[in-house]
Image: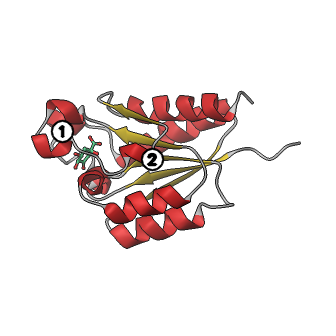
Amino acid sequence: MARQPKILVLNGPNLNMLGQRQPEIYGRATLADIEAMCRTHGEALGFDIDFRQSNIEGELVTWIQQARGEHDGIAINAAAYTHTSVALLDALTLVDIPVIEVHLSNVFARDKFRHHSYISPVAAGVICGFGPNSYILALDALRSILGEA
Ligand code: DQA
């Protein structure tokens, strides 16, 4: 049987606090709840899900570098680093696999500084504003980009 596509789902700073963090914006689901949703949906799509979170920019950079030759696609919620990180842009530029940018909230309906993303130019697409479902939609997008199982 052919190897299942391996998808790296990356989460940036403060997303480990989901559930407690500004629930009026981010909802009540914890990151563990979102991971469980991704695993269930990933299984249905025939994906092997590698779900990670870090508060450390360099750790995210290292994981993106290591995705070369290891993973088939990336769904990334870079959180605040979306709006600040040239390092994440450079790392994502050098991986030659499809990248989907994900946000729980509709960043365009929020502070002006959240309207700019350093990583959108290298993303195949951006999904924001659907809460935890943004992750599910990102996995669906990767499934369609990678071709049906
Ligand atoms: C976020 C939006 C970012 O602006 C913010 O810094 C986050 C979370 C989201 O998922 O809506 O930490 O990426």
Residue 53 appears in which quarter of the rendering?
A: bottom left
Q: Name the spot of residue 30 as percent of width and height, x first.
A: 33, 45
Ligand 1 image position (quadrant): top left
Ligand 1 within 8 angstroms of badge 1 C-beta = no
Q: Up-down: is 29 above or below 129?
A: below
Q: Of callouts 1 and 2, which one flags the residue occurring earlier in the amino acid sequence? A: 1
x and y, in percent, of residue 64 in the image? 51, 62
* Quadrant into which the N terminus falls: top right
Q: Left or right: 4 with respect to 90?
A: right
Closer-to-camera residue (80/84) = 84
In the figure, is residue 128 to the left or right of 125?
Answer: left
Q: Amino acid at mark 1?
A: Pro
Q: Which residue is mark 2?
A: 122
Q: Nearer the viewer, residue 93 or 9?
A: 93
> Which residue is located at x 70 percent, y 35 percent?
46
State the residue position of label 1: 23
Residue 149's x, y, as percent? 75, 30
Cα distance, mark 1 to mark 2? Answer: 30 Å
Picture disc at residue 128: none
Ligand 1 lies under 8 Å from the Cβ of mark 2: no
